[in-house]
Structure formats: structure tokens, C-alpha cells
Image (cartoon, rainbow, N blue to C red):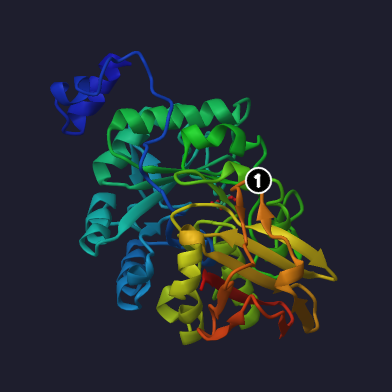
Amino acid sequence: MKKFLLVAGFLMGLSAPDLYAQGNNYVQDYTKYEGLALTPPMGWNSWNKFACNIDEKLIREIADVMVSSGMKDAGYQYINLDDCWHGERDSLGFIHPDAKRFPSGMKALADYIHSKGLKIGLYSDAGSQTCGGRPGSRGYEFQDALTYAKWGVDYLKYDWCNTEGLKAEGAYKTIAAALKRAGRPMVLSICEWGNDEPWKWGPAVGHLWRTTGDIFNCFDCVEDHGTWKSFGVMQILDKQKGLRQYAGPGHWNDPDMLEVGNGMVVNEDRAHFAMWAMIAAPLVAGNDLRSMSATTLQILTNKDVIAVNQDSLGIQGFQYREKDKLEIWFKPLQDGDWAVCFLNRNDIGQQVNFDWSKEVVDDSLSKRKIEIGGRGYTLRNLWTKKVAGTTKKAFKAVVPPHDVLMFRLSKN
Ligand code: GLA
């Protein structure tokens, strides 16, 4: 391995001292880079909208719009290429991008993205092939990590197709070690769909882990693909039950990427975005930013909702009550603030009547409690931006179908 690394390093322009400076060559460090993703990662990923149909022109244009639309200013940072950027491995095993789709090469694309003040993510797979049938990293982990580092990659999503005989924890530890050894800090996004309870071993190994199978662009449906299923926004939300204790700064539950702007109606997009904010999910847009409507942009760049998601405490929100498909969720925030979200999953509008003086919102996980005494809290509607009274009075309103009312509670 030492010899191989040296050869690989020389081929890639690293010197022997560079390689040896990374420490002794037979002890591996199977842990992630610390200090990354202290709040849920925000960015864009190609898969939900474009699947395998990606090329460097598209990615450059998306990076341009990320900046010009104001999304970068709103906090979006990563431009992530999902499956199918790959070409072939060469005779020495080095992976190359698809030469037709990425004629300028991956380093040039990374340089372009960096020149915009953004970061670049790539995708690979722990198995022999990716889910899209491209070369996987199995057996090439250290070599691929060196290649990604040399290109200037900042984020790696690592999938779980074609992994015959592998165990997830071990396989993800191998790629974490490879990234460490390659020496460039990268976010590691564990994508094994929650099969092997990654929330239990993932926090030390990666920065986020998928908790479910793939999202499907519908509010409340399951899409059957024959050998596998994908899930609507509400189904994915339900699968997050019991996981909030595992999330926190640097390590997040990942309920999959956003479908905002991909075809649901506007109230469903709003509810989707609001709930992903409430559960401290990574906010990875999955739509065509180049042609999005003003409404989609408004949802994706709602700074108050993003602030709930990006809150520095990093506490995932929780469901407080559910009745007749009306759910009430809370999320403790820094400075004693709270977010509250009334989610109506029903097909008809539903009346809320929430009398703060009769409720006890007491989160044993974060040891935080809403104190209704004294002057109470002001409620600010995070979508209309209007103040909607205080906790001194019962809150009464109608939540439209498949929609949310979302507020920030601040101490008076
Ligand atoms: C899996 C992942 C998706 C996407 C595709 C690409 O299904 O869960 O998010 O990366 O593979 O093939």
C-alpha cells in the first residue's frame, strides 16, 4: 500500500514528504473530518431533476444561477454532481469523468465552482458499480479519494448499490479513512438508505446519513418501481420517527434532497421546505435553478425558515401532537427562541386552536421548555413575515390543505 500510495502520489504530483507527512502509513483513521457541516449542509444536487443527464455546461450554469438568484447569499454552498459523471478507469485504475460530457475535466469544473465562492460535491458508491451502472469505488477507495482531493472536491456522497458481501459500517469507515489520508477536508454523505441504522455508527464516520430510500416528487404517495420503492414527502417525514436524538452539529439525519420546484403545488412545496427546516435536514435543492419560478425561489430562499434549519444549537425538531392529520411540531432554537409549525396533511383546511396556557411544551432531549409565564413570547409568521400575537392568547387559524403555518416564538 505504501508503495502504491507513493506511485499514486507521484503520478498525481504529490511528493514523498507530502505523503509521509500524513503520518504513519499503516494506521488508518476511520473518522470524518471534524469541524465541517456544523449546521445542516445546504446546496444543490443534480439527481432529482436531471438523473444521468448531466454535463459541465449544465453544472456551470447551475453554479451561475446559484449566485445570481441570491441562493448563495441565502446560504446554499455546495454544487453536487450525483451519479453518472463518470467515464472509465484508465490502465492504472484512475477514474476519469465522462470525456464527452465533461471535456474540460473535473479540476476545471471544480476551479470554476470555487471561483464563484461555491464548493463542489461528487458522488461515488461503496460497491463495484454505482446505482446508475458507472464505476464504483470498491477496491479503489484510496485511489479515488486521492483523485477527488487533487481535483479539489469538497463533498462526497457515497452510495450503496452493488455492495455484495460488504457491511455498511466497515465500508464507510474505509472511505472515511481514504478521505483522511488524501488530506483534503471533505463532507462525507453516507447514502445507504438507513438499512444498517447509520445513525448509530455514522456520527463518527460521516457528516450526514440518509435515513430512508429515495424521495419521490409527490406530497403523499409511494411510488413502486418493481424491485424498489420511493417515497413522497410525508412518507419520508414519517420515517424520521425516533431519530432526532442522533442529529447534532456535524452529524445530521438526511431525509433526502428537496423536491421543491419539481412539480408539487406551491403549498406542498412550502410544507416540504418548512418540515425539512424543522427536522434540521440538509437543504439540498433538486430542481432546475435556471428555470425556476419566482415562487420556488422565494420558498428556497426564505431566510427566516432557513434560520430555523441552520440554527446553531442544531437540535432536530419534534412532533408535539397529531390529530386528524393536523400535526404540531416544535424546534428549540438559540437564545431561548422556538419554531412552531402547524402541518395540515389533510385534503381540506383544518382549524387550529392552540391555547398556550393549557399546553406543556417540554423537550426532555434538549432539556428546554416553553415558559408561558411572564410576558410570554411573540409569534412571527415566517412565511407572511407578520407578527401574529403572543402566547398570552390562544392561537386560532385555519391551515390550508397540504400546507403549513410556521412561526418563530421570541421572548418578549
Ligand atoms: C440512489 C440514491 C439516489 C441517487 C441514485 C443515483 O438511488 O439513493 O439519491 O444518488 O442512487 O443513481
Above or below, comparing residue 360 to residue 188 in the picture:
below
Q: Give coordinates of residue 307: x percent, y percent.
A: 45, 66
Q: Is residue 365 above or below residue 138?
A: below
Is residue 272 rendered to the left or right of residue 249?
A: right
Q: Is residue 24 visible?
A: yes
Q: Closer to the camera, 398 or 135?
A: 398
Q: Quadrant of residue 42?
A: bottom left
List the single residue furthest toward the right: 324
| Residue 96 percent across, percent down from the top left | 33, 44
Query: Horizontally, is 186 left or right of 299 in the view?
Result: left
Q: Position of residue 120 (x, y in %)?
A: 33, 54
Is the N terminus in the top left, top right, bottom left or bottom right quadrant? top left
Q: Is residue 242 above or below residue 389?
A: above
Q: Which residue is mark 1?
A: 243
Mark 1 residue CB less than 8 A from any atom of ligand 1: no
Residue 90, position in %: x, y? 33, 35
| Front-most of residues 287 and 237 | 237
| Residue type, mark 1 in image | Leu
Residue at x-position 48% and y-position 28%: 173
Residue shown at the point (54%, 36%) measured from the top left: 202
